[in-house]
Image (cartoon, grey):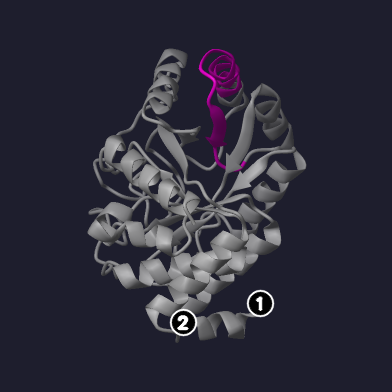
Amino acid sequence: MDRSKIRALLDLPLTSLLALADEARRASGIAKVELCSILNAKSGSCPEDCKFCAQSSHHSTGSPVYPLKSRTEVLEAARRAKEIGAERFDVVTSGNTLTKDEVARIADVVREIRDTIGIDMCASLGSLEEEDLVLLKESGVSRYHHNIETSPNFFPNIVTTHTFQDRIDTIKAAKKAGLQVCSGGIIGMGESWDDRIDMALILKELGVDSVPINILVPVKGTRFEKISPLSAVDAVKTIAIFRIVLKDKIIKIAAGRESILKDFQSMAFMAGANGMLIGGYLTIKGRSAEEDRRLAEEVNRLWQAQ
């Protein structure tokens, strides 16, 4: 489907767009919501200047600052993730990259999590060299997370300390290392519909496996603190467009779903989402894992009855 045909979908009534997205989901055989949980394993003091990020050292947000968490802390977080119903556990660190020692420490604890807890492992550790990504793969990481954030055209409006191509290079290196890739971005940063469509088309071209869609929550102290929140309708329409473009990929609703969609979170699944982060985010608290698990179970029952 070319860009002009995708753009024309936005002129449809919302109910018609949702029907097309749900049809695409069913045609892809998707009948289950994937639940993931993340750990902010190293927080704050990031030298990158991402305008949306509370952890950037260019902002004064009061966000927690701490070095890489201990093996015991990461293990406990993995156990908690499994207890609340997550199928995947993602170790996330601030900054654009890690030292060799930090990568090795994470690889060691991933091996222990794989052997003793038994939860699928993801990692989001910034731009790593291929040899580090291979080490993570060998330790038990199955999916590497690295967002492209937005379109290449809009990217310079949100960060200048690294390039869009840097992001693409990391994704390609992760795929070369044999890892699945989780990559999406943030909507509601002032980008256009064409930027959102371009992001979806690039993710399709890259062949990523999972696509998290975050909705900007303007954080006080960041340069995006005064951006007007995205409407729930536009958020749902974006999810629908991504489902239609990306067909059988996992589309995961993440940060911002509670504050933007509020009581209409179920509409995200009507629009084709089939994944959800539970248990909170990096610097933003989510709703209770029990509520999220119950919602996922209800969606699963509905889809499996179709």
Q: Is residue 98 visible?
A: no
Judging depth in this view, the residue of 295 and 236 nearest the camera is 295
Please identify the quarter of the rendering in which residue 222 is found.
bottom left
Residue 271, image x, y percentages = 44, 65
Residue 205, image x, y percentages = 69, 63
Q: Looking at the image, which residue is at 69% across and 52% down?
A: 169
Would you place residue 302 above or below residue 247 in this image? above
Relative to 137, is 265 on the left or the right? left
Q: Secondary structure at mark 1?
A: loop
Q: Residues within 10 Å of mark 2 (few under 14, many from 20)?
A: some
Q: Residues within 10 Å of mark 1 (few under 14, many from 20)?
A: few
| Residue that protrudes farthest toward the right in the picture | 176
Of the numbered discs 2 and 1, the one sitting upstream in the chain is 1
Q: Looking at the image, which residue is at 62% across and 58% down?
A: 28
Alpha carbon distance from label 2 to label 1: 14 Å
Q: Secondary structure at mark 2?
A: loop
Q: Looking at the image, which residue is at 64% across and 38% down?
A: 128
Q: Look at the image and say whether residue 110 sits in the magenta stretch.
A: yes
Residue 102, image x, y percentages = 55, 24
* Residue to which mark 2 is pinned: 10
Which quadrant of the figure contains the N terminus? bottom right
Q: Looking at the image, which residue is at 27% across and 53% down?
A: 258
CB within 8 Å, label 2 to label 1: no
Q: Amino acid at mark 1?
A: Met
Relative to 167, is 271 on the left or the right? left
Q: Is residue 259 visible?
A: yes
Would you place residue 99 above or below residue 27 in this image? above
In magenta, the rendered stretch is: 105-127
* Residue to which mark 1 is pinned: 1
